[in-house]
Image (cartoon, rainbow, N blue to C red):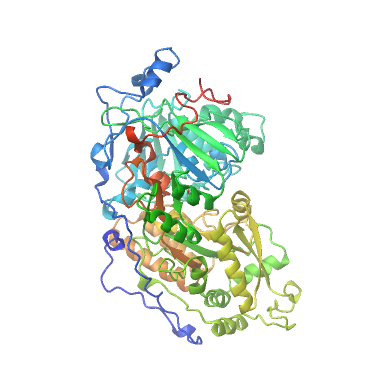
């Protein structure tokens, strides 16, 4: 499948690996071994980008009968045609795997996260697993692009229904959908977009959930309102089409300014903390542009979301979407999501923790199994990331500062990567053809991956120890752990604090594997295991020496979250950010990475872009920018009663599958509908009030 999507890779091009400087190793750097073939089971049906959706008026519109009977006829809601924009977003039937659907039923999700509150724009998580994806709508949309040929790929319109570039390419005018409404009926317009930009992205005291910063859209970029339905971007580069990806989930999804603005410190007496926490999980009916609205929350139990009566998307027959009346989010664990999905008590899972592969596959192989399970490409990967800031990000103490200086030492990084037995790490998660040797850099399942440009330092403990000695680390007290040089951190044992997300079994297993393997090298690694929310807080504020992180989109799609590939801004990289008032102290090879990313953003030519990313891959893997741990394919598990699930949907590429399957189009045939709705025939109520409307 990868070869189908690969963007014109010039034949025979191979970036030579310079071995001269490194030939002290028993094993020389090479390319990673060919991974065991693992054919994606679901074959993607590739389509043209413009075959998915359009914006147009239809002769008439429909909604579930109970909405008309119970809410429109009683005057509680205006008729559906008055709730929709003049030209709604229309999903084309030809692109819907099972065509036009019917109303009813619910999708029962299970998640391991917990909601902090509903203030996404101020950085609060709703618990992941697709809750925020169901609430949020963004200027553009990229998740469904997995089915579009790479050469045809440009983000899909969404809240921005169209856009035009100025002739010099420095200005981008975006036309917003006209007449769309928030789920409480308030109009959506450019003020919402400007509030998100001015008071959340640009305001240095606010940090939206997925970490959008001004540099996410290019250094020096500005945005202004032209009129209620038009905004204009100005960029330093010409035609930086790449930023259209940053306008998709999760970096440009504006919140309801009519609700948020009165709480923002600029317009109230609130502190920034009070603003962030103004919409706790108990705050129900938060206005959204997404297809479902949260109407019920019971701690450690469930979040229920009901259909948004103002949703602005329809099918070609004029049926207002979504088809599913309800979404449920059971608050459990990520491992339980797999168990429940294969057992049929849950409806959906991204099978991403290899520890669950064998049991899930066995269960799904039974023809009577309630759920379909299909593996995709190798796009789930893990990296060990080293904190590269030596100028104060996270206020390190003496020991931690000394570790960071080691992290910046090339011999030290090579020692670490060579001391990793990746085969053993992979096998400790699951035996069989799933996991592959992954040295770091791009996931092998992405169209930009080029094996020949990937530098791999094979497992070689003796070589690794020699490099550690070269980096000046010796075991001076004979306890098996090397010591800092005399004069550094008191010459004590080298102790490294590794930040880990405790919500996932896989993260913990990999962390334990790394600890054991590093001990053999002579490094003491101490785990700092936190839940996902606390882990993120520690990471963003730089309080870690090492960090285990599941790969994000910059490594699985390259075009999504591209700015996270390197420290192009003070807060864009995961492991190298600027302290409060400072610069990122880039190492020379990082400067090269930043230059490549900046060039990539403003380059239009597909061959040149592929070439730039081959260079990126080579420099980043040769210098061990990230220490790859393992990579493997994930499988999508969806209950068999659902229709319109595109075949071959990867669980992760431009975004997670909760977005890629386009949930607003998913439906359950009438004869298969189950009675799972917890709030049948009810709609969201008033913002901040308990419970649904009726
Ligand atoms: C978590 C899960 C993923 C996916 C995302 C969606 O990260 O582990 O499988 O559901 O949430 O945001």
Q: Is residue 3 above or below residue 346?
A: below
Q: How many marks?
A: 0
Residue 81 percent across, percent down from the top left: 33, 20
273 relative to 685 in the view: left or right? right
Of 157 and 226, nearer the camera is 157
Q: In the rendering, at what x and y percent does residue 80 appear?
A: 36, 21
608 relative position to 135: left or right: left
Q: Nearer the viewer, residue 549 or 428?
A: 428
Vertically, is 106 above or below 59? below
Whether residue 401 is situated above or below residue 533 in the rendered picture: below
- Where residue 292 sits, quadrant-wise, is top left
Q: Is residue 515 left or right of residue 162?
A: right
Residue 8, located in which quarter of the rendered image?
bottom left
Residue 492 on image: x %, y %: 74, 75
Task: Point out residue 390 in the picture as x, y percentages from the top left corner.
Answer: 63, 65
Q: Quadrant of residue 3?
A: bottom left
Q: Is 79 in front, or is 42?
A: 42
- Which quadrant is the N terminus positioned in? bottom left
User: Does any portion of residue 73 appear in the rendered image?
Assistant: yes
Q: Residue at x 68, y 79 (%)?
A: 482
Residue at 40%, 68% (x, y): give it: 433
Task: Please determine whether, in this image, residue 264 is positioned above or below residue 501.
Answer: above
* Residue 244 in sight here: no
């Amino acid at each position: 499948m990868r070869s189908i999507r690969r963007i014109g890779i010039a034949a025979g091009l191979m970036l030579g690996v310079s071995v001269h400087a490194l030939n002290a190793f028993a094993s020389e750097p090479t390319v990673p071994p060919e991974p065991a073939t693992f054919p994606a089971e679901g074959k993607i049906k590739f389509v043209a980008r413009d075959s998915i959706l359009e914006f147009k008026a239809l002769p008439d519109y429909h909604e579930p009968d109970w909405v008309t009977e119970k809410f429109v006829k009683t005057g509680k809601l205006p008729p559906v045609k008055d709730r929709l924009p003049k030209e709604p977003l229309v999903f084309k039937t030809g692109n819907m795997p099972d065509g036009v659907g019917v109303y009813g039923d619910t999708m029962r999700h299970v998640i391991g996260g917990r909601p902090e509150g509903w203030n996404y724009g101020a950085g609060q998580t709703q618990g992941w697993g697709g809750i925020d994806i169901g609430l949020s709508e963004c200027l553009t949309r990229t998740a469904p692009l997995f089915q579009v040929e790479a050469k045809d790929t440009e983000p899909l319109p969404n809240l921005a229904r169209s856009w035009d570039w100025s002739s010099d390419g420095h200005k981008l005018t975006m036309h917003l959908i006209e007449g769309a409404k928030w789920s409480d009926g308030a109009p959506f317009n450019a003020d919402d977009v400007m509030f998100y930009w001015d008071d959340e992205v640009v305001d240095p005291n606010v940090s939206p959930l997925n970490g959008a910063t001004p540099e996410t859209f290019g250094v020096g970029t500005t945005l202004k309102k032209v009129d209620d339905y038009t905004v204009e971007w100005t960029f330093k580069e010409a035609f930086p089409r790449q930023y259209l990806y940053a306008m998709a989930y999760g970096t440009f999804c504006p919140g309801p300014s009519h609700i948020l603005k009165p709480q923002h410190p600029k317009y109230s007496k609130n502190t920034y903390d009070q603003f962030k926490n103004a919409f706790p999980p108990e705050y129900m009916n938060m206005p959204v542009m997404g297809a479902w609205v949260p109407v019920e929350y019971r701690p450690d139990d469930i979040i229920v979301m009901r259909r948004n009566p103002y949703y602005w998307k329809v099918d070609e027959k004029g049926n207002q979407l979504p088809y599913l009346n309800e979404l449920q989010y059971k608050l459990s664990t990520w491992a339980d999501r797999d168990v429940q999905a294969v057992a049929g008590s849950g409806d959906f899972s991204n099978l991403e923790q290899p520890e669950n592969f064998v049991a899930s596959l066995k269960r799904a192989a039974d023809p009577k199994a309630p759920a379909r399970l299909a593996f995709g490409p190798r796009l789930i990967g893990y990296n060990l990331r080293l904190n590269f800031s030596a100028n104060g990000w996270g206020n390190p103490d003496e020991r931690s500062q000394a570790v960071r200086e080691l992290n910046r030492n090339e011999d030290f990084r090579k020692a670490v990567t060579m001391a990793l037995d990746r085969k053993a790490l992979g096998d400790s998660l699951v035996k069989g053809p799933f996991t592959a040797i992954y040295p770091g850099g791009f996931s092998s399942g992405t169209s930009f991956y080029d094996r020949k440009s990937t530098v791999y330092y094979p497992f070689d403990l003796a070589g690794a120890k020699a490099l550690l000695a070269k980096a000046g680390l010796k075991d001076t007290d004979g306890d098996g752990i090397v010591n800092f040089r005399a004069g550094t951190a008191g010459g004590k044992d080298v102790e490294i604090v590794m930040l880990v997300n405790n919500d996932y079994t896989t993260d913990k297993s990999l962390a334990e594997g790394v600890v054991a393997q590093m001990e053999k090298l002579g490094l003491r690694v101490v785990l700092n295991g936190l839940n996902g929310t606390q882990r993120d807080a520690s990471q963003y504020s730089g309080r870690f020496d090492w960090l285990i992180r599941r790969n994000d989109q910059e490594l699985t799609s390259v075009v999504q979250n591209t700015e996270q590939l390197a420290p192009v801004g003070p807060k864009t990289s995961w492991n190298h950010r600027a302290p409060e008032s400072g610069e990122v102290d880039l190492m020379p090879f990082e400067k090269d990475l930043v230059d490549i990313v900046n060039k990539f953003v403003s380059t239009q030519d597909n061959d040149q872009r592929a070439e730039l990313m081959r260079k990126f891959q080579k420099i980043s893997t040769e210098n061990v920018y990230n220490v790859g741990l393992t990579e493997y394919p994930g499988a999508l598990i969806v209950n068999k009663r659902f229709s319109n699930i595109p075949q071959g949907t990867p669980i992760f590429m431009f975004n997670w599958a909760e977005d890629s399957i386009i949930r607003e189009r998913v439906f359950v045939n009438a004869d298969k509908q189950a009675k799972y709705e917890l709030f049948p025939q009810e709609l969201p109520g008033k913002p901040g009030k308990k419970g649904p409307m009726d």
